[in-house]
Image (spheres, rainbow, N blue to C red):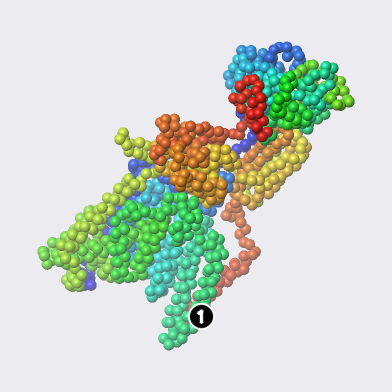
Amino acid sequence: MAASDAPNGDVLIRNAFGSVLAFLILLLIGVLAFSIRLFSVIKYESVIHEFDPYFNYRVTQFLTKNGIYDFWNWFDDRTWYPLGRVIGGTVYPGLTLTAGTLYWFLHSLNIPLSVETVCVFTAPIFSAFASWATFLLTKEVKGVGAGLTAAALLAMVPSYISRSVAGSYDNEAVAIFALIFTFYLYIKTLNTGSLFYATLNSLSYFYMVCSWGGYTFIINLIPMHVLLCIVTGRYSSRLYIAYAPLVVLGTLLAALVPVVGFNAVMTSEHFASFLVFIIIHVVALVYYIKGILSPKMFKVALALVVSIGLAVCCAMVAVIIALVASSPTKGWSGRSLSLLDPTYASKYIPIIASVSEHQPPTWPSYFMDINVLAFLIPAGIIACFSPLSDASLFAVLYIVLSVYFSGVMVRLMLVLAPAACILSGIALSQAFDVFTRSIKFQLPSLSDHSHIDARDASSENIVPDDTIKTDKSEDTPKERMTKRSKKKEKEPVEKPPTKFQIKKRLSVLPFEASIIAVILLVLLVAFYVVHCVWAAAEAYSAPSIVLTSHSNDGLHVFDDFREAYAWLSHNTDVDDKVASWWDYGYQTTAMANRTVIVDNNTWNNTHIATVGTAMSSPEKAAWEIFHSLDVKYVLVVFGGLVGYPSDDINKFLWMVRIGGGVFPHIKEPDYLRDGQYRIDSMATPTMLNCLMYKLSYYRFVETDGKAFDRVRRTEIGKKYFKLTHFEEVFTTHHWMVRIYKLKPPKNRIRGKNKKSKSKTSSTTTSKRKGTRRNPF
Amino acid sequence: MSKKLIVLFLGLVPLLCTCFSPDTPSDRRVLVLLDDFAIKSSHSIFFNNLKSRGFDLDFKLADDPTISLQRYGQYLYDALILFSPTIERFGGSIDAAAILDFVDSGHDLIVAANSNASDLIREIATECGVDFDEDSSALVIDHSGYAVSATEGDHTLIASDDFIKSDVILGSEKIKAPVLFQGIGHSLNPSNSLVLKVLSASPSAYSANPKSKLTSPPSLTGTSMSLVSVVQARNNARILISGSLSMFSNRFFRSDVQKAGSPTKHDKSGNEQFVTELSKWVFHERGHLKAVNVKHHKVGEVDEPAIYRINDDLEYSVEIYEWSGKTWEPYVANDVQVQFYMMSPYVLKTLSTDNKGYYFTAFKVPDVYGVFQFKVEYERLGYTSLSLSKQIPVRPFRHNEYERFIPAAYPYYGAAFSMMAGFFIFTAVHLYHK
């Protein structure tokens, strides 16, 4: 329409200009996504964060040193002693291979970065990719403007920042990119019906399967979307092309990943895709038959097919139920079951429930993690319905499902974040579109035609461009962009097309209301930016192996973890085994290079329960358990002196629960006084005599004379005691990590006569009676 | 990931001493602490016997202020004989703790007490797991197993022949005559696995003060009471504890003996043979084993691998020698076993031997991966305990170690290829038919 008003060449120039502008904006978004994640490096240092990233880092080191085949076949004998772990077959290799490729690529260019540096910066790089993928996906759904807005939102959404700051070298860092990109290719295939994109989609899905266990989200979401399309009568050959190759190729490729293997066809997380695969073929057949038969014949055939089809369906349902029932673990893994039934894990699997990121999120965490997007999502959903396309239907489905899943597990907020950004991007873009259009069409009546507000211009710019290409809903304001881009937009001032103006006038809003609304929206987005920068700088950039605290006398740095690991690596034998709660397993193997009994890959519940039992047992029993596992050192984390709340005493009840789940002589009520967990003088004797209490509080009274625990805010129950089977070998500067050594068995076994008795001389008959009481 | 050879001679780890070496485990320098030098002559047969076996005896009074066990952190002696039952405080820097440290660093000890044993001696004995009767005036009395002598006494001189049945401790030759014993008895904790009763009291013996009237039942009675015991600590240090000092004396060595109720009268008591054989054991002239050259490798290979694969066939060998007092002799036994161990033994095999000290076996690695250990836990009465463990990981198959084609799957291969061919033909027909 607009093309008829403007000369052809002008349109071309404007198109080209828009593309260049979009490209520049995307570039800036990439820079923004990368740089907002560098706070951790600037404020702390370039280190790997937390727990899991240390394992990934260690695996990457192995990969770069030994090559891909050794990595594939790596049997690690330094974890899970004495069981060992087949790393190559139990790890999602995507992240490692990505970083390894990056490392080799850089080295082939003679850029000698260390493996650690590459690992630290992998996540920020991929978050830039992720925002570009978001642009592509949203562009397919609602056009360029919404795409740019969504990309900018995603570049700094706190939820995603929390998992992808520099140093947070975890699977999610690359998996979110893979997730969004897979969705983009799916939508692209759906929009174009191109087999080329369908193949790319399978490959992208393969990369996602390599990267993260969350790939099951894709293989369930896409079938659901397909099913929804079929049910709502949106079946097309494009849908078939988008879906069928993905299932066949994707499943074949997924089965190639060692950690997935036959799970790709045997566990029920994948069954939905196969069911929908069958349905889409049936539907395709029906459409084909409908095409070649006359309507009357078709009715007859339909009656026939429906009756037969019902029988077949019944048989199929029976087969599927039988398959589910016969497959291992009833087809559902514990983590997936806890997705469907949020209370499942806490009821049956303490090891899953014990991880804080598997807990349901609280309301504030939604505001913390997606901030204003939470309020924009509903608007985005409405925008998706006007008009509803296959792609926007997908966006709606995506947000609905991810909201549900995020309500089950904090960790899945990460899946919600891109959906929230896409929907909010659409909402913002549509809102700006409506408001600026209203302003624009009322402006000429108020003042000079040529004098137009910058906002107006931008909206004006894009509207005609996009209407040429697709439909009117795809126009895009650029208000969300930086000031620089706004300035650029001022230059091309255009006369509004009159025809268009008349048509649009039907839906204009009052001028003043539009101005105010635009200002409010800009303010809203500004708050979002402020919040995101704050979250990136303060909340999510701490590496958790180095802790800081601000107090009146300045900044305190607690570097106790690395101190302890360095001590272990310098003062113990290379084959010594170190026992600790599983949280510290990855760090111990990666930083101290010592063999551990259990680690963060919680694949063997019994083994973890053994360690939990040892920690909850009295000293002698614990010594025997540890000795039978050849343990030489025991490491406990203790925060009572400096007030570090996530220490072993606070995690202790989980050790009791997990230990008691396998060894029933450990009973949780023994450690609780009237249902309360306490370590003060009211604590139960079992609690005060267990190994964890003793190792944590040994000699604690020497620090302040009162033994006041700053985390529990109380004086401890038992202050003076000795260790008989363990000896303290190292305690870090702030007492956060304490390392004990198992004493060897006694060289001699003492007799029974008491020392004091043998010292009192002379004979009495009463003494004889005393000895006679001995059973011996 | 170099798998280090961990050979644990349980006793030979804390080697502060240079003389007590794994190469020649017998003791050489012995410190003898006496109450007074009269004992040196009254027990000269025993001492001369030791000297003739090559020991270098250093006699000191127990309260000599110059005595010391170590200098500059090095022990000056390999063994210690305490013939000073009445001493309350040692001279010099020695106290009970020093003596126990001496034992804990792998040195041997002979302690003899008698009726007026001091608390110090009792404490040392208790620390080693031997509880002397707490009544310090009590003696072992046996009204049916006493030694017949010219002067009819109070039956505190006992002729005992209830020896431990072990050729390693008491020598292969049978003790010919009963052993004369006069002194105090002691008890052992039955749960204590390190202490052995070498000479037990007879069922009719009890421990009481012979001079006073018995008012209450004696605390130690019968065979649960021990007269002479030995201890082998976990570090293989050996300790002999006797309740009688006079058992070692010339008088008892030369005395004739006739057990009450027994018609045979022996010209010479069994004391000399008993004490000599026992001292040979205590001073590591007998019953000391060493294991060397632990080797394992795949069948058909020579080098030791860093890691095994499941279902590998491997060979394991070890050489075990016994110290004869002068040289290492091959140790011959048919009950040495090796475990392939990961939390529990997966393989338990008795080693074959070539009777020259070489023990070997071959077995298949179980179909389980993990970090295994080759374990030899050899504990036999009187012998030093051998505890060898060597860690070795076992890995699963590599990706290319599985069979590439398996016959059972040929139908599937056929299905796949016929499907491909069929699809190709169908496509061709469908596209170009009309």
Q: Is residue A328 depicted above or below A712 in this figure?
A: below
Residue A701 screen position, x and y as percent? 44, 32
Residue A538 screen position, x and y as percent? 32, 45
Query: In which image quadrant can residue A385 be found?
Result: bottom left
**Quick check: B260 left or right of A284?**
right
Nearest the viewer among A301 and B363 is A301
Identify which residue is drawn at 69% across, 18% down.
Answer: B116
**Quick check: B175 left or right of A455?**
right
Q: Residues within 10 Å of mark 1 (few under 14, many from 20)?
A: few
**Quick check: B412 left or right of A534?**
right
Residue A279 screen position, x and y as percent? 46, 73
Query: In which image quadrant can residue A514 be found?
Result: bottom left
Q: Is residue A286 visible?
A: yes
Identify which residue is drawn at 58% across, 70% down.
Answer: B415
Q: Is residue A235 depicted above or below A94 in this figure?
A: below
Chain of the residue where label 1 is placed in the rendered structure: A
Q: How many numbered dots are placed on residues in this image?
A: 1
